[in-house]
Image: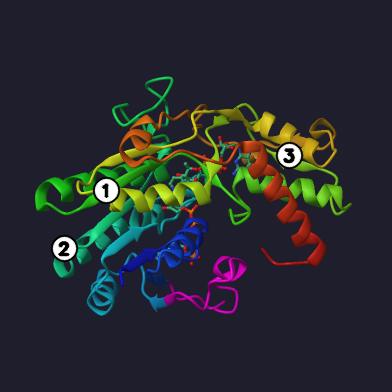
Amino acid sequence: MTTALITGITGQDGAYLSQLLLGKGYRVVGLLRRSASADVVGERLRWLGIIDDVELIDGNLTDLSSLIRIMETVRPDEIYNLAAQSFVAASWQQPLLTGNVTGIGAVNVLEAARIVQSKARFYQASSSEMYGLIQQPVQNENTPFYPRSPYAVAKLYAHWMTVNYRESFGMHASSGILFNHESPLRGIEFVTRKVTDGVARIKLGLAKELPLGNLDATRDWGHARDYVRAMHLMLQQDTPDDYVVATGRTTSIRDLCRIAFSYADLNYEDHVVTNPAFLRPAEVEVLLGDASKAKRVLGWEAETTLESMVAEMVDADLARHRNRATI
Ligand code: NDP
Ligand code: GDR
């Protein structure tokens, strides 16, 4: 039986990746950071009905000795490093923590793997945010990076350390440069989920307005369920490498609102207001990915349209508010 260790198992991608790997017969072990609110931890795994099928083990990305202990105990065949302080806006408020977790934390995992389990295959969750102030209209694996937030700078460090461990130590370390991907399990602070939750509240008469920041930024949005397939495929290749994972379509926040509100028979112009509190010190205005390498080498393609994903998210948020669920 193949054993996978997932850091960030309680996040959006960790939950979908666990579901995928369990379906393939893997033993799935997740790193869990200690919380005083243990009763609500694992809500996403519970939502997918797999909380009892995964093993959770205490540790923290900032604590190398905990990672070494986990590698010794679990002896993973595949390691997926998904844990991060992943909210770009928060990274200006907590730049050092973001650097410690999102940047150095990834190197802690690489080090623990190198010391204890160097034959394990390693996946790093890199990000399209590394392109930041885009240097080419469509971004692929050869596009120069220009990070625009403490989060993106930390991710870039982790990305190059992954490449460096591959080249220095011959580790099977791959990096997925994933563009934005969403789902009903997306954190409420990210714009897609904030919009679908807002639509549900307004539709049910629980709110009238939805305050947002920059409506003109555009993103290449896919579905998390599709994107975790790409992560797994990268670790099944004989040779480790880096891959862009994207849909090849970019949509503005304004058009996202149009799609989500009209799905619930609402007009976004009647409800969306702009609030400067949600603007960022430096913005990533446009992202558009070219995933042709992933298609050619991995046979991977996005399968879910933005419209069907938004419909799934609005339906899930309507159900949550009707049931007074917590996430
Ligand atoms: P989430 O924010 O949903 O999940 C982050 C996970 O990291 C959570 O499980 C969280 O645990 C965990 N975590 C945070 N800090 C620590 C720590 N110090 N020690 C251990 N675990 C920690 O992110 P996503 O699932 O959306 O994304 C997964 C990864 O992919 C992240 O690295 C993200 O930066 C990256 N990424 C995401 C993209 C996206 O569009 N979703 C696109 C490109 C990259 P807890 O539940 O306790 O908070
Ligand atoms: P992003 O996602 O920063 O791309 O990072 P987010 O959904 O937070 O922002 C996308 C765009 O929407 C604009 N925006 C708003 N964003 C939020 N959160 N809230 C608002 O009210 C709002 N109004 C407008 C933002 O300015 C931005 O342009 C995500 C994370 O998952 C990262 O971890 C990951 O690496 C990247 O995607 C790829």
Where is residue 126? Give x, y as percent: 36, 45
Tell me if I can see residue 103 in this picture. Answer: no
**What is the magenta range?**
33-55
Residue kind at label 2, given as amino acid type: Ser
Residue highlighted by disc 2: 118
Q: Is 146 on the left or on the right of 167, as rendered? A: right
Q: Earlier in the sequence, mark 2 or mark 1?
A: 2
Where is residue 50? Give x, y as percent: 53, 71
Residue highlighted by disc 3: 260
Where is residue 136? Give x, y as percent: 38, 20
Tell me if I can see residue 244 in this picture. Answer: yes
**In magenta stretch: residue 101:** no
**Quarter of the rendered image showing ligand 1:** bottom left
- Mark 2, secondary structure of its residue: loop
Question: At 50% across and 62% down in the image, what residue appears?
Answer: 15
Q: Is residue 65 above or below residue 61?
A: below
Determine the CA span between mark 2 and mark 1: 14 Å
Q: Are marks 2 and 3 in contact (CB under 8 Å)?
A: no
Badge 2: residue crowd in 10 Å (few <14, some 14–19, many ≥20): some
Q: Is residue 311 above or below residue 257?
A: below
Residue highlighted by disc 1: 174
Q: Is 148 on the left or on the right of 47, as rendered? A: left
Q: Quadrant of the N terminus?
A: bottom left
296 vs 67, nearest the viewer: 296
Q: Earlier in the sequence, mark 3 or mark 1?
A: 1
State the residue lying farthest toward the top: 137
Q: Is 98 on the left or on the right of 210, as rendered? A: left
Question: At 27% across and 56% down in the image, what residue appears?
Answer: 122
